[in-house]
Amino acid sequence: MVNPIYIFILALGAGFLLTLFDKAGRKVSLTIFYAVLAAMVAISAQWLIALLGGSETAMIFTAGFKPPFSINLQMGLEEAIFTLAVNMLGLLSGLYLIKKFNATKVNAMVLFLMMIMGINGLIMTRDMFNLFVFMEITSIATFAMIGIDRDIKTLSAGFKYMIASGIASVLFLIGTIYLYRFSGMLHIDSMAVALDMASSQATLLAVFILLMAIVIELKPFPANGWALDVYEAVDSGVVAVIAAGSSAGMLFALYKITPLLNETLLLTVAGIGITTFVASNLMGLMQKNAKRLLGYSSIGQIGLVAGVFAMLVYLGYPINGKMVMLIAGGLFINHFVAKAGLFWLAGILNKENTEDWGALRKKPIYLFAFGAFILALVGLPPFPSFFAKWQMVMIFAKDNQFLVIAFILLGTLLEAVYLFRWLGKILESEVKEKIKVSFAQGLPVIVATLAVLGLGIYSATIVPGAGSLNIFYLPLLLIAALFVLDFLPVWVKNTLVILLMGFYTWQLLPGLEGYRFLFGVIFLVGGVILLIPGYAFKGKRVGFYPFAVMMYTGLAGLLIAENTLQFFTAWELMTLGSYFLIIRGKKAKPHALSYMLFSLGGAYAMLSGLGLFFSVNGNNLDLALLSSITESTSIIYILLVIGFLTKLASMGLHIWLPGAHGEAETDVSPMVSAILLKAGMFGLVVVMSAIQNPMIGNVSINYVLSWLGAITVFGGNLMAIYQEDAKRLLAYSSVGNLGYVLFGLTLMTHLGWLTSITYALNHFLFKALLFLAIGGVVWRVKTKNMYEMGGLIKRMPISFISVLIGIIALSGVPPLSGFAGKWLTYNVLIEKGWVLQGVVLIIGGLIAFLYCFRLIHTIFLGQLKDNHRKVKEAPLPILIPQVIFMFAIMFFSAYPNMVLRPVGDFLIKYFPQGAINWQNGVAFTAFGHWDGLGVLMITGVVFMAVFGWLLLTNRKTQKVGQFNIVYAAERPSRPELTHVGYNFFAHYRKALGVLSKPYAEKFWDGLSELFHSTADFIRKLYTGNGQTYLVHIIVFILVVYAFAMGG
Amino acid sequence: MVKKIFIVIILGFFAVMLLPLAKDFTPFQELSPVAEKYVEDGPEELGSANLVTSVIVTYRGLDTLGEVAVLFIAAAGVGFFLRKEEKGDKTPKRGSSQILQSGTAFLFPLILAFGVYIFLHGHLTPGGGFQGGVVIASGMVLLLLSSASAKINENVLHLVESLSGASYVAIGILGLVLATGFLDNRFLDLGEFGTLLSAGAIPLIYSFIGLKVGAELVGIVNNMQKDQS
Amino acid sequence: MTLITILGLVLIMIGLWGMLTQKNIIKIIIGFSIMDTGVHLIMVSIGYLKDRTAPIIDSAVDQANAVNTVVDPIPSALVLTAIVIGLAVTALMLSYAIKLYEKKGTLDINEFKELKW
């Protein structure tokens, strides 16, 4: 095996001689340069392989003396991983810079080699003073390398960097020499043994000063203005090495001196790191400059890694143990790869403003890379940070560090805000120009993308509970295949996905029991049916199928999840997939963002809840234990329920829904509305069936939730009536509908659950039907505003019948299935005696009539618009599922016992009392009975009688021409006003006044504004003046000193 | 003014923070364990009379290689940083005084010889490669100052710098291959203690360091003055 | 030898004062150098032992009793490295100053605030 010291020998030797070789031609020097970088990669790779294969950690004694008498280097697993990462980064960034290397003096290559060598030294050396030497090699090479561009911005940024780094090195020297004085050696490991921390104030102070030197280099808030300037100004290829590589070296230095730190200092580092993480991401909210934004994110991530690492050590996890590797290592490598990739991309695009990155859309591969990096930074599956974050929350929860968890999740959420905003901006921008990507600049980005994916998969195999993640392997393989096959035409992919998903459903469904089976039908059978409209699309529909499958994978995963890790992974996959489906809509970008943020916020609440659950059930991931926990039950319950309620869009958490569902594509709207919302409900069912009747003090949480449900019904329906946009109307209506579901569940009785679950099935049917029908209409008439439609009954009769059946089912009037729900609801209300909620529900139900009426009246009745005289019926692929759903509704209405009975049967397991009695398809409760088929037939007879009578008596009616306005009383000032359906319920808005105001939007807008203005206020700290930054550093040290050492 | 008061205050606090370093600290009464070993065994092990040299060149040889690298980086960095952007018009330099010119003519060879002496005797007397290199560079700087037309041949400079650096690394490898570790000086005969040709490879290493440091410092000064012309 | 240590601390403070209050970049660099020198003094003072001589075995120092007669050679070795590194940093700072001056015609650090927030 090659002695790792050859990494230094090669780099130095080549560095010294490169000037000479350059005389023989630039090709010669470039070849040698890359050969050396490649050799460095090879050496560390070879060691990594050997060490993974069980070799022992290698110690390299220079000069032939054992430490502490001479400097020694170490090549263990951690060193091998870090050096391999850094050397790969060096090779790729070197390749990335090839054009610049060609154009400038040979010195650039020399300096670059020295920079990479310096980082290797930071990682491998075990001697305190040698650490300093390598720190300086890295810094000085970086200072010089910054000069690859010499514009005024780069120069002033570099100078500020030098001042800050100068202070750090002075502190490092003072610390080192005193530690030598107190311990008698410079070998770090012996020093830690020899040092008696308690011996004097000066010993502790020396450690503190040394620590501060390293901390300053890690860019703590607020002593990091210089770093931001560097990230913003310096060439992308160089800054990738600074952001990823140098930080790696400094983090490793921190890792090495950790044995010297006492508990207080460890906590101090944890505090600094996490504060930096939150503060940086907060300030990132206001940033528009792409590279500076990446800088904020980098600083935050480094803070996170350092903070989490220190926290883990503080909690007693062994410094080179598996947990530290998995969590801190996972977070680090994730940041390392993603950030390098993003900086490279920044250089390729060469656009300062984050809003000008739209050119990426022309390059699907790089757009994919960008997306992957963003998702990795936010910590979504299947990236390493997802598993690291998961495990971190479990571990910290186990040790009751909930404040830490809260701050970290807050910081992550803030980061998600600006990263997803950025992604959304790219996806919505108009592409004007093309970018050219050279091979040398493209390859590094592609390698980074593959690396981050590969590392994610690797993390998935080492996280505790990893074995259970195998349920996702096949679907994820399919998703990957779909990404590759994305060049195929849409019908091929659609058929393929329908077949595979159909097969999967067929395999999976029979194995599901109880409510899981019912949700399986909704998620998967519904999913397959809703893929049929896909045939209506032309072209390739790039990026649709991978994410659709991802969403269904998540949904299926929820059904079969047996432990919390599976459940949470499935949950996040579902969120991710649906986000990318929603964002496809033309105007859906801002709504997709708020969908993602609410989902993440909810997911983090859920994650905290799962962490707490993990800690109280004896560190077990098994989901089934949820019913047997005795501690912190209420808090776990609340946290999990908050997570599910964001998906369920309950009042207050609903503001993402109308836009997201309303603006989505024709077939995506029914998917997310009819199917996806049920995921929230599924979660509620899981939790509520396990934890029954949790209390806070004397208050039953479910009682509070029942009010939330009732208000949601009322509010959702009320807002629906004011919508001019047909799809938004349906979206608001979903908010209200899901309010019923929530309400039903909170009753915690047999009938309540039966109602809720059947209502959910019902909602699935009619909302899918309505969204498809309306979507089909919109498909043809190219507008969603109802006042621009009218009289479409003649042009689109099937859609009309769909909507008619849909609204009858929705509004809950006989004879269709909705009535069954209502009837049961009132039974339950009487049973439970919750009269007030009942009143609200009844009013809410009445309001539903208003918008249902409007939907059919404004679109299909009245007069046909001139420009719609030739519209055709919706495309066949959109009609077919409608017919299926119509039949399903009719069947369910005629034979409600087919569903209600089996559901009732398994509910007996949870609620043995109050079940329905069935006699030949007729339901009997304590308060009456209901015969679905009978009602259907009676209503049918009555309908036919009235219909016939009307036909008979109206034969002689006089028809009025379309433009006969003889009966009109006012002159329309705006085009909309010519339509009777415009602002149809304005009078209700006036009458209901205070109830109609959008309080929730105002609250969330205000919160967002508060965050943004705070961010803007704090970032004013960074004045741009190098001296001010120096003051920050000194004040920072003093403040930390006051905290850590008690003054 | 307010700003200055503020700075006085924070520096005051900073000083108070650092004060224990001077106050709570009793000087060594005897050598540290590591130093004790160096002083006891150093002369026999490495054969160098100057113990600081044996620490610098051998015991902590990697530091010194790093140190050479730092200086090398600085030289390369300054050269890179001050590379010509575009051909500017040169303002003619003012000639130097007669005293400086005559003095240089007389002193230059002496300074050079002194520098060489210092690095050759690094293992015997105070001094060594760095010190010798600096002295040599000071002679060259004197030359640059004294004559407006004096130009350093950069090719020679690079050659000296590159070859001496590479030779240093090569000697390090010889230590790894022929003796016990990278930069081990004992692959050459230790010779008779206290003479010029003793201490194994130390004089060799120090000579290369001396040449390299000299060449690099000259390079730095040359680049800076070139840029200003 | 606490006196030298204190002197070193004083130099560090003077250097910092210069770096924080002087507007001229060259003066800031001088401040940095002073601070660096202060650190070097402290380092040397750490290795010093009272009434002892330089760690060179020659006619003045008996090899057998050297352990009790010479000062610590390690800080001397370290300080050499530190000085060289300080020199390297200073050289680069100065070339930055040259370039900054070329670009803006001024060395006032308050003039270089292109990047902020």
Image (cartoon, coloured by chain):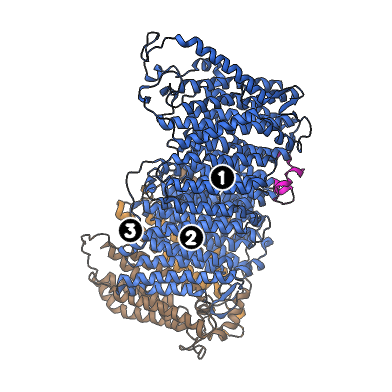
Chain colours: A blue, B brown, C orange
Type of amino acid under label 3? Ile
Q: Please check whether the numbered discs 1 and 3 fall on a single chain.
A: no
Residue type marked 1: Tyr
Q: CA distance from mark 3 to mark 2?
A: 26 Å
Q: Nearer the viewer, residue A1030 or A649?
A: A649
Q: Secondary structure at mark 1?
A: helix
Question: Is label 2 in contact with label 1 (beta carbons under 8 Å)?
Answer: no
Q: Which residue is mark 2?
A: A246
Residue A396, above or below A534: below
Q: Residue B38: percent from the left, percent from the top?
A: 58, 79
Q: Nearer the viewer, mark 2 or mark 1?
A: 1
Q: Are marks 2 and 1 on the same chain?
A: yes
Residue at the image point whose x is 51% and y is 79% from the top: B182
Residue A392, percent from left and from top: 63, 52
User: How dense is the environment of label 1, judged by Cα within 10 Å: few (below 14), some, or many (20 and up)?
Assistant: many
Name the image quarter holding the C terminus of chain B: bottom left
Left or right of B133: which side holds A390? Answer: right
Report the disc number at residue C98.
Answer: 3
Q: Position of residue A905 (x, y in %)?
A: 74, 36
Q: Return the residue at label 1.
A: A552
Badge 3: residue crowd in 10 Å (few <14, some 14–19, many ≥20): many
